[in-house]
Image (tube, rainbow, N blue to C red):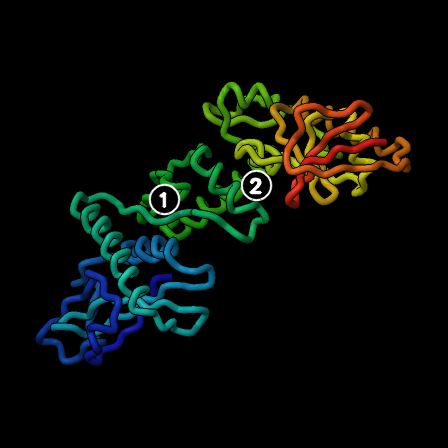
Amino acid sequence: MNQIDDMPSQPNIDELLLTPFFNQIDENSTSILAQDEELIANYTSYDLFCLKTRLLLFLKEDEMVQFKKVLLNNRMVVTIKILDGSIERNLTPNEKEQLKGYINEITEEIIISNGRKERSYCLLYYYNTSINIPEEYQQLILPYLEIETDTAKIKIRNSQVFASIPETYNFKNYQEIYEELNIKIVTMLKNAYKEGYIPCDQNFKGNWELVQVNKNTCKPNWNYPSFIPDKSKFLFDRYNNFKINIRIPDNQSFYHLVAKHINPVTFISGYLQFLPNNINEVRQIYTLVEYLKTQDYSFKVSINRLPYKPKKIPENCVIYTLNEGLFPVVISTK
């Protein structure tokens, strides 16, 4: 994973993404490439592994890091190339400067850890686009996962999981341990999304009829596949105070029928839109809408659209809001 290409020719230093990692060249050696450079390196393969994984945070999804050694001042210095697939990317001057800053920040942490005789932290997980779980949910729930392991030290920062992994453990090397931990996190995320795990306090827990999973996480103890097919998405939207949109017949007569039972009420292009306060309210509105769909709404109505709500509503009329146009308030008469 950390294979390095050698390039003994003297390069243009301004074109390079340099790291502080190098192999000192033996001045008495007759061949740069023939010597055992690993014996006089100021880094390990794990250091490069940590650098590579952590740089992924600053790259596009299909980009990857490649290490390349170049000869500078009697040293084989480790440099970095950014590949898009198998093709080297031509970085803009601004991109190059940003990456140099990231490289310096990461390698400084690695060098400090090595000086303390500690294992550096690699990036273990930040989000995975291939597991069919929304990125936003992954980032929300990751800090609340309780990742138990005897093989590594784990820390979570800004919804990113980092691991300090030993060189070997139970006859497994650090890369094998890394893969096992990564699979474990993906499994935990899949289970969390399936069960509807969500961060919660006591008010949120009570309003949405949740049960405690651990200190800061809850899950629903209900199942309503007919109107909440995705529990995690539903609770994620409630956590973020998003409105609910219920699909309804898109005609003025049905709007009139709904507005007789719900006040205030807002519609938008064939949807009933509302901001619920608790799960009971959601159940009641969904049940009401399904009932009203079975009723006769073929009657005709006349409507009057206004820019604002009137102080007094005429008798035998209903009022609702259309979330569109310059005249959102509708007075509907049967």
- Considering the numbered disc 1 on the image, is that residue within a helix, a strand or a loop? strand
Q: Is residue 326 above or below residue 260?
A: below
Q: Is residue 229 visible?
A: no
- Considering the numbered disc 2 on the image, is that residue within a helix, a strand or a loop? helix
Viewport quadrant of the N terminus: bottom left
Residue occupied by mark 2:
190
Query: How far from the left and from the top, in percent, is residue 206?
Result: 57, 19
Amino acid marked by disc 2: Lys
The structure residue drawn at horizontal position 36% and vertical position 67%, both measured from the top left corner, is 82
211 vs 259, left or right, is left
70 vs 219, left or right, is left
Q: Quadrant of residue 99?
A: bottom left
The structure residue drawn at horizontal position 26% and vertical position 45%, both measured from the top left corner, is 119
The mark tally for this picture is 2
Amino acid marked by disc 1: Phe
Query: How far from the left and from the top, in percent, is residue 250?
Result: 79, 43
Residue occupied by mark 1:
162
The structure residue drawn at horizontal position 19% and vertical position 74%, both measured from the top left corner, is 71
